[in-house]
Image (cartoon, helix red, strand yellow):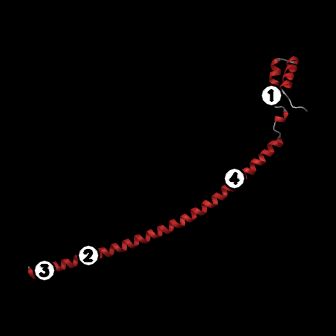
Amino acid sequence: MEPITDGHRRLLHQQVEAATSTQSADTLMAHLPQGGAQALATKADLAATESRLEAKIDKVDAKIDKIDAKLEGKIDKLEGKIDKVEGMIAQVEGKFTSQTWKIVTAQSAIMIAIAALAIAIAERFG
């Protein structure tokens, strides 16, 4: 079968118009594909396209899974590092607290010594 040309389409339109009406010929021509039957997709064409799309989607899903696994690993490492930093902060806070108590105790001892000295001076010269 030779390809359908515009000449074939015009001839068909004229023959349908002669047999029925212009409106019927126009309606028929509007429903016929421009490139003929070879321009239409078959169920097999659609199934092949679907298979190719599914294969591509599977590849994309596999890539996403791979990226997700990498990200999860990196997130786990970061969480471990954050835990270490939090532990170090807790140690520093403990040391600050300990150091603060030492300073307060030393200052209290100095103030008591100064007060004792002041009392002794007052008693001796007072």
Question: In the visual, does 95 lie left or right of 28?
Answer: left
Instruction: Return the residue at label 4.
Output: 60
Q: Amino acid at mark 1?
A: His
Question: In the visual, does 71 lie left or right of 4?
Answer: left
Spot the residue most to the left: 126
Residue 96 sits in quarter: bottom left
- The spot of residue 18 in percent (x, y) is 87, 17
Picture residue at 22% right of the left edge, 75% below the top? 111
Q: Is mark 2 in CB contact (under 8 Å) with mark 1?
A: no
Instruction: Return the residue at label 1.
Output: 31
Mark-to-mark CA distance, 2 and 1: 103 Å
Tell me the element at label 1. Answer: helix
Label number found at residue 108: 2
> In the rendered image, which quarter contains the C terminus?
bottom left
Mark-to-mark CA distance, 4 and 2: 71 Å
- The spot of residue 77 in percent (x, y) is 56, 65
Instruction: Return the residue at label 3.
Output: 121
Mark-to-mark CA distance, 1 and 3: 121 Å
Which sits earlier in the primary sequence, circle 2 or circle 1?
1
Picture residue at 36% right of the left edge, 74% below the top? 98
Q: Amino acid at mark 3?
A: Ile
Q: Is mark 3 in CB contact (under 8 Å) with mark 2?
A: no
